Amino acid sequence: MNRLANHRLHRACAALSPTDYAAPRSGFFPSIRATLNHILLVDRFYINAMQGHRLDRPALDEARGLLALDDLVLRQADSDAQLLELVAALTPDDLSRIVVVDRGDREQHDRMDDLLSHLFQHQTHHRGQVHAMLSSTTVAPPQLDEFIVGDDAAARAADMAALGWTEADLMR
């Protein structure tokens, strides 16, 4: 779901000029570029922790930079692939496992399922902000909901092909 939503949102953002992509807008973060960078940064932060790694400051600093859209799309796709791989490998016991999140100055201890719920909510929240920001541009915001049910297969066919996915990949 997240990968498909990111694909659609990034495709819409690609129709913006670099100036419009970075232009000041109303939102929690001051631009589409800053909001997409924040999504990537937080994805990397939590995926890193859920993979059992300590805080990787150089990787976070790299993600914190305000990337050009082409670079961000590649890095977000990599993070999305890591998240899909992580989730696909989880067992029911893994979901209740405590994950140590290294915050630099302290450690956070939370269940895997709670962290996943938090991460998905975070992604959805900020993608919605980018969607709203696109409304103030000449680019139409993409459809980001109602594409999981089987009845919507025709509407998502081009996106699925672009991602190299089949219906079985999405509906498992």
Image: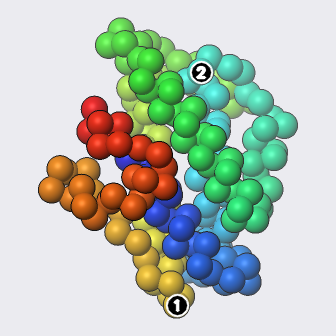
Specify whether 99 is left or right of 76.
Answer: left
- Per the image, the residue denoted by label 1 is 138
Query: Which quarter of the picture shows residue 140?
Result: bottom left
Closer to the camera in the image, 172 or 66: 172
Q: Is residue 20 above or below residue 4?
A: below
Instruction: Please state the horizontal and vertical placement of residue 154, each as a whole percent of the image.
Output: 25, 61
Instruction: Please state the horizontal and vertical placement of residue 21, each as a whole percent of the image.
Output: 66, 77
Give the number of marks.
2
- Per the image, the residue denoted by label 2 is 51
Identify which residue is drawn at 55% across, 24% down: 50
Give the crowd class for mark 2: few <14, some 14-19, many >=20 residues within 10 Å.
few
The C terminus appears in which quarter of the rendering? top left
Residue type pointed to by label 2: Gln
Spatial CA span between label 1 and label 2 = 40 Å
Closer to the camera in the image, 16 or 128: 16
Identify which residue is drawn at 37% across, 13% down: 91
